[in-house]
C-alpha cells in the first residue's frame, strides 16, 4: 500500500496579544485528515455551511443532545464565560475575508447539521473532522484549552458523538458510498486506496459494495492473506498492531512527566490511567505510530500471549497544547499533539503478557483523537492471542496508537520514523 500524500493545512495563528506570531500563518499539520495542499478550501467549506445556516428562518436545534449542550453553556457560569472567551478571540473573517464561527450558538447549529451527515469525499479537499474544523481557532488558544478540558463539556461532547456514531453506523450514512467522481467507491477515491478490492472484504457487484453503513466501510476487514503475519513461528519478532506511519520511538520512559511541555515526554502513569502495573514499565520503551483516514483501522496483537487486562479510558476530545512557536511545516496528521494526546485523550488499554519471557508484559494503547475517538476492544481478560489476531478497532476515523514495553525488553527496531508500516509487518526483534 503506497503512502498517503503528505498534505498540510495553513491557518492563521490564534490572535491573542501575547503571541509573538500574531497574525502569522501557521502550517498546522493534519495530514489527510482535514485538507490537502490547497488550504483555502477548508474555509470555503465552512463559508458554505455558514451561508446555509442563514437560509433557516429560525435557529432550529433538532437534536435534543444539542439542546442539552446549549443548556449547559447557558446555565453554568464557568462554561458560559469560557465559550464567550474563546470566540471573542476569533477574528470575524479569515485573511481572505471569509467568515468564521464567532459564537457558541452558531457552533451548536453547525454541530446540529453535522449529526446527520457522513464525511464526503472531495478530490479538492477532505474535511474528515467537521467538528474540529469549527474549533480550529479555539484549539490553538490557551483559554480554549481551559474550557475544552472541562469535564462537563467533555461529557456533552461524548453524548454528541454517541448520536453521530449511531448515524454513521446506520444505512442512511451510505449515501456517500457511491462510484461517482465524488464517491468513496469512485475512481478518484480509489487512487488513495490502491488494490482496495483485492485487500478488503467487499463485493463491487452489490449495492454499496456490500457495506451496510459508513462505519462498516471505514472499519472494513481484510481479506484472508491480504496482510500476512511476519514470522508467525518466531516469538522474538514483534509485529505492527496497526496500518500506520511511525511517529516516535522513546526510550527510558519515566513514570510521571510534564507531558504538556516542549517535546511532550511520555508520562506512563497518565498514559496507563494510573494502573498499578504502570510502575513495571518505568525505564521502558514507547513506540507510537499514526493512522490515516485511508488506512486499515483495526488493531492486531503484536505478540503471542494472554490478555491480562482491558480498559477504555474516557478522556478529553479537543484538548491540545497551545504553542507560541510555529510547528515544523513538515509535521503531519496532528503530529504535534499526538504524544500529548496519549495521556489525556479517550483511549483503549490492552495489557498482554507475552509468551516470550524476554518481552513479558506489554501494553497496546489505541488513542482516539477529537471526534474520531470511538475505541472498541474485542478481546477479554484471560484470552490467548497470537500475532495478527484481532484485538479491537477504531470507529468513524483513524487515530494513533502506542506499544509500551518494560525496561527488560531489549529489542532492535526494524522500522524508522516516518515509515508507513503495514499491519502485521515486523517492527522489532527482541535481542
Image (spheres, helix red, strand yellow):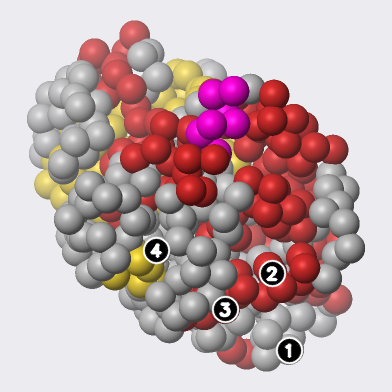
Q: How far apart are marks 3 and 1 (CA)?
A: 22 Å
Label 1 or label 4, whichever comes before in sequence order? 4
Q: Which numbered circle lies on residue 180?
A: 1
Q: Give the range drawn in magenta.
A: 77-83
Residue at position x 39%, y 81% from top?
37
Label 1 or label 2, whichever comes before in sequence order? 2
Label 3 SS: helix
In percent of width and height, residue 70 lies at 72, 36
Left or right: where 253 falls relative to 51: left
Q: How far apart are marks 1 and 2 (CA)?
A: 23 Å
Q: Nearer the viewer, residue 230 or 110?
A: 110
Q: Which numbered circle lies on residue 44?
A: 3
Label 3 or label 2, whichever comes before in sequence order? 3
Q: Which of marks 4 and 3 is in front?
A: 3
Q: Does the magenta stretch include residue 107?
A: no
Which residue is denoted by mark 4 in the rendering?
30
Label 4 SS: loop
Label 2 SS: helix
Q: Nearer the viewer, mark 3 or mark 1?
A: 3
In percent of width and height, residue 404 lies at 28, 33
Label 4 or label 3, whichever comes before in sequence order? 4
Q: Nearer the viewer, residue 346 or 62?
A: 62
Q: Which numbered circle lies on residue 49?
A: 2
In percent of width and height, residue 246 lies at 27, 56
Q: How far apart are marks 2 and 4 (CA)?
A: 21 Å
Residue at position x 85%, y 65% from top?
56
Q: Nearer the viewer, mark 2 or mark 4?
A: 2
Amino acid at each position: 500500500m503506497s503512502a498517503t500524500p503528505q498534505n498540510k493545512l495553513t491557518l492563521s495563528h490564534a490572535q491573542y496579544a501575547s503571541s509573538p506570531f500574531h497574525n502569522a500563518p501557521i502550517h498546522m499539520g493534519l495530514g489527510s485528515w482535514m485538507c490537502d495542499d490547497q488550504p483555502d478550501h477548508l474555509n470555503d467549506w465552512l463559508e458554505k455551511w455558514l451561508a446555509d445556516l442563514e437560509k433557516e428562518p429560525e435557529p432550529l436545534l433538532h437534536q435534543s443532545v444539542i439542546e442539552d449542550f446549549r443548556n449547559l453553556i447557558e446555565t453554568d457560569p464557568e462554561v458560559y464565560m469560557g465559550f464567550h472567551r474563546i470566540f471573542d478571540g476569533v477574528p470575524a473573517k479569515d485573511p481572505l475575508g471569509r467568515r468564521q464561527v464567532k459564537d457558541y450558538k452558531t457552533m451548536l447549529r453547525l454541530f446540529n447539521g453535522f449529526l446527520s451527515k457522513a464525511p464526503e469525499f472531495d478530490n479538492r479537499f477532505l474535511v474528515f473532522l467537521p467538528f474540529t474544523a469549527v474549533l480550529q481557532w479555539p484549539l490553538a488558544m490557551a483559554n480554549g484549552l481551559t474550557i475544552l478540558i472541562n469535564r462537563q463539556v467533555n461529557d456533552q461532547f461524548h453524548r454528541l458523538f454517541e448520536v453521530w456514531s449511531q448515524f454513521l453506523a446506520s444505512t442512511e450514512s451510505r449515501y456517500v458510498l457511491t462510484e461517482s467522481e465524488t464517491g468513496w467507491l469512485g475512481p478518484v477515491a480509489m487512487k488513495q486506496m490502491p488494490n482496495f478490492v483485492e485487500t478488503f472484504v467487499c463485493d463491487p457487484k452489490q449495492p454499496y459494495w456490500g457495506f451496510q453503513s459508513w462505519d462498516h466501510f471505514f472499519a472494513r476487514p481484510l481479506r484472508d492473506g491480504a496482510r500476512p503475519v511476519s514470522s508467525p513461528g518466531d516469538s522474538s519478532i514483534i509485529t505492527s498492531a496497526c496500518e500506520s506511519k511511525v511517529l516516535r520511538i522513546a526510550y527510558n520512559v519515566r513514570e510521571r512527566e510534564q507531558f504538556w511541555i516542549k517535546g511532550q515526554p511520555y508520562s506512563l502513569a497518565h498514559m496507563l490511567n494510573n494502573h498499578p502495573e504502570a510502575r513495571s514499565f518505568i525505564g521502558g520503551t514507547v513506540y507510537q505510530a499514526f493512522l490515516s483516514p485511508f488506512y486499515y483501522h483495526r488493531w492486531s496483537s503484536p505478540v503471542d500471549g494472554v490478555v491480562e487486562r482491558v480498559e477504555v479510558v474516557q478522556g478529553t476530545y479537543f484538548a491540545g497544547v497551545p504553542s507560541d512557536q510555529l510547528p515544523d511545516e513538515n509535521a503531519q496528521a496532528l503530529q504535534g499533539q499526538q504524544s500529548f494526546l496519549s495521556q489525556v485523550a479517550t483511549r483503549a488499554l490492552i495489557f498482554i503478557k507475552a509468551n516470550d519471557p524476554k518481552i513479558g508484559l506489554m501494553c497496546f494503547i489505541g488513542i482516539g483523537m477529537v471526534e474520531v475517538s470511538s475505541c472498541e476492544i474485542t478481546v477479554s481478560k484471560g484470552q490467548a492471542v497470537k500475532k495478527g489476531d484481532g484485538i479491537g478497532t477504531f470507529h468513524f476515523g483513524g487515530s494513533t496508537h502506542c506499544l509500551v514495553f518494560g525496561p527488560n525488553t531489549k529489542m532492535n527496531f526494524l522500522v524508522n520514523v516516518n515509515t508507513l508500516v503495514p499491519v502485521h509487518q515486523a517492527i522489532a526483534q527482541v535481542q
